[in-house]
Each structure stands twice: as C-alpha cells, then as structure tokens.
Amino acid sequence: MTTPGAGARQPSVAIVGSGPSGCYLAQFLRKRWRESDIVVFDRLDTPYGLVRYGVAPDHPGTRAVSKQFDRLFQRESIRFVGSTLISTIEGDGDLTLGQLRGSFDIVVLATGLHADRALAGPGGPLPGAELSGVYGAGRLTRLINGHPEEKVDDLSLGRRVLIVGHGNVAIDLLRLFLTPAEQLRALGIANDVVDAITAGPVREIDIVGRSQPAQAKFDVAMVRELEKLSDVAFEAHGVEVEPDEQSTRHEAIATLAAGSDDAAGRVVRFHFGWEPIELTGVDSVSGIVLLAMDGSRSTVSMPADAVCTAIGFAEHDTAPLRRADHEHIEHIDLERGILGDNLFCVGWLRRGPRGTIPENRVDARMVSDTIIASYAERSNSVFKPGASALDIQPPITS
C-alpha cells in the first residue's frame, strides 16, 4: 500500500495557532503528507487554545478532545513551538509572518478570535459600555480556566447579575455563577477566582436576548442541565409562541420554569425579545435599559451589580496577526481559506465566531483539501527548508 504523497517532495508547513482548528488541520495534513515538516506555533507555552481555555470546566467530554491532539505531538512527529509570538511587523513578536513565509512552503493562520464582541448600537458602542462591572464572556471563561494572561483584578459580580446573550456560553456562565464554591474548586478553578465569583453571593440572574426561544442559540441539552441546580427558581418572560411555532427550545424553557421551586432562595429570569440600548451607572454599572423587539418601541430598566456579555467574539484591533491586513490581496478566497500565495486561514479566523469544536473539524478538513489541491498545482517550485531555517527551540509536547 502506497502512502499518499510518497515519491514526491513533501512541503514544509507552519500553522500559527494551536486551538482546535490548527490541531485538526495538522491532523488532516499529516494523514496526506507523512514526511512533511509540520510545526504548530503558539504565543502561549501550552497548546489547544479554545479547548483548554474556552470551554466550561464542568464539560469534561468536550475538553477530552485534547487527548486526541496529544497524539499529534507525541506520535505523529508534529512539533509544537510555544511561547512564540508571530507578528506582521518586525519587533512586535518573536518571529514575523514574513519569516515564516520565507522558511515554509505553506503557512496557515489559525489564531482564532479572542476579543469579546462589544455591546453596540447603530451609532457605535452602547452608552455605558465602558463602565466597570461589565465583563465579556471570553475573558471570564479564560479566567475560570486559568489562562495565564487573565487576572481577577477587580472582578465583582455582586448579588444581581445580568447576562446578555442566549447562546451556550451564556448558559455556561449562568450555571457556573450558581455552582457552590466547593464544587468550583473541585473542578480545578483557582481559589482567588472562586472567591470572586461566589463573593456576592449571586442571588438573581437575568439573562436577556433579542430573539424568541425558537431562534435562540442555546442547545436544549444545556437548558436541561440547569434542572440539576439546587435552590434555584426559573422564570421565562416575553415568550410569544403560536401553537404551530412550538419548538424544542421553547419546551425546554417552559419545562424548566414549570418544574422549579418558587420558594427557592435564588432566581433566574429568562427574558426574550429585548435588546440592550444603554448601560446605566456612575463609574460602575448599576443597570441596563432594554428595548422591546416587538415593534412597540417600549423600554424597560433592570438593576444589575454586574453585566456579562455573551454575544460573540471579534478580532482584536491590536492583534499581532489580523485577517483584515490580508483582505485586500487580489487572489484572496475566504470561502476556501486562501489569504494569498501559499498563505491560508482556518477556523474562526476564516469564517467568523460561529460553530462548535466539531464544526471546526469540518472546516479544517475543507481547508486541508484546499491546501493539498493548491500544492498539487504548483510546478517548478523552489522548496523551502521549514523549521531548520529558523532558530527554533526543541519541540514541546504539552
């Protein structure tokens, strides 16, 4: 049986970013090119990105995918080079993108999107978005998972928290905010983070979104998990469902509210059909103003000691590598993951902050097919030496 790609010189590949998209891509390329020099770079000293730092710590099944990635570095001769910042501009990092492109036949950007998408209106940032006490879900999840660049600092949730967003990340935050301190510590969360989360303690959570349950982004299974929380009453407000519009999400919310204990000491209120238009407070947030999405233009104000946004992610304006810096290139084809000549992108950096970890695998397969086809079309190439052309430390294997 012939190994795919055997008999021909196999390309050197640099992948920038060791999250799920970068690791899945390395996996697919290794299956095609068994002898290629494949190196995965990351600015952190440990790999796996979103899998390690962006998934709730009480979801071990999702996090277990890292064991699959361990095999890449331990058995598949793929090198991980951590603590190495790749930048566009010389002097901003340890290596430049130009150096990688000069040393490797193929370079792939898999750096993801790390900035929390800010609350904004038609005219720009939402009034009050700069107040203290407003926290992005990305920052909070990284902090909970021990990301080395996140610190507790002034984190204070108080007794009444408002979460903006109706996706799985919002449900994760809700659940973790109501989990007892001893259980959080048992998950490996640092003591100072546990102390900050439970200091209030949180007694009320309002979770607000623009859509109705049928259009919300949360998984039904995530809502059903909330039934396991003790001493919590659940309420649903603003639900407008016609008999023929019943959805599994609506049923899950209705079942959760109907089955909860009205005498519980803590309460979670789901609000559907409302959009934030202003955060109120002096120096620190004290409430939020919401606009009804039913066309009535009515508004309502809610008090809050903290506001947590779980509305997606964006590219940092100051990121050392930005997709936007390449979008003017003549031959760009984001549908296939092409940023330029032998330069590619994959994952959230390619398609935006949507999709689960399994969907990143599908995306990585598509981009790997693009890379393999593109390489096959090359002729009379001057092959590049790969990692041997750079001053790279010995491989690290997590």
Image (cartoon, rainbow, N blue to C red):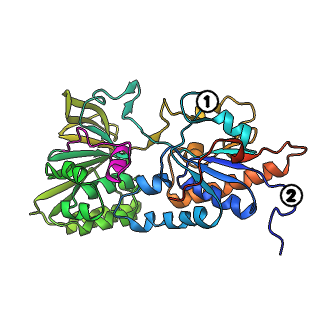
Mark 1 lies on residue: 325
Sequence-wise, which precedes: disc 1 or disc 2?
A: 2
Can residue 54 be seen here? no
Residue 142 magenta-highlighted: yes
Residue at the extreme bottom of the image, as rendered: 1
Q: Residue at x 38, y 35 (%)?
A: 118
Q: Residue at x 53, y 48 (%)?
A: 82
**For the residue labelled by badge 2, is the local secondary structure a helix, a strand or a loop?**
loop
What is the crowding at mark 1: few (fewer than 14 residues within 10 Å), some, or many (at least 20)?
Answer: few
* Quadrant assignment, res 382: top right
Front residue of this view, candidates 154 and 338: 154
Cα separation, mark 1 vs mark 2, equals: 34 Å
Magenta-colored span: 139-157
Position of the N terminus by quadrant: bottom right
Identify the amino acid type marked 1.
Answer: Asp
What is the crowding at mark 2: few (fewer than 14 residues within 10 Å), some, or many (at least 20)?
Answer: few
Of discs 1 and 2, which sits in the foreground? 2
The reply, left or right, for residue 5 in relation to residue 229 is: right
Above or below, comparing residue 353 to residue 191 in the picture = above
- Image mark for residue 74: none
The reply, left or right, for residue 185 in relation to residue 94 is: left
Residue at the extreme top of the image, as rendered: 123
Front residue of this view, candidates 367 and 248: 367
Residue 45 magenta-highlighted: no
Identify the amino acid type marked 2.
Answer: Ala
Residue 263, position in %: x, y?
8, 63
- Image mark for residue 8: 2
Residue 125, position in %: x, y?
37, 27
Q: Are marks 1 and 2 in contact (CB under 8 Å)?
A: no
The reply, left or right, for residue 325 in relation to residue 336 is: left
* Quadrant assignment, res 293: top left
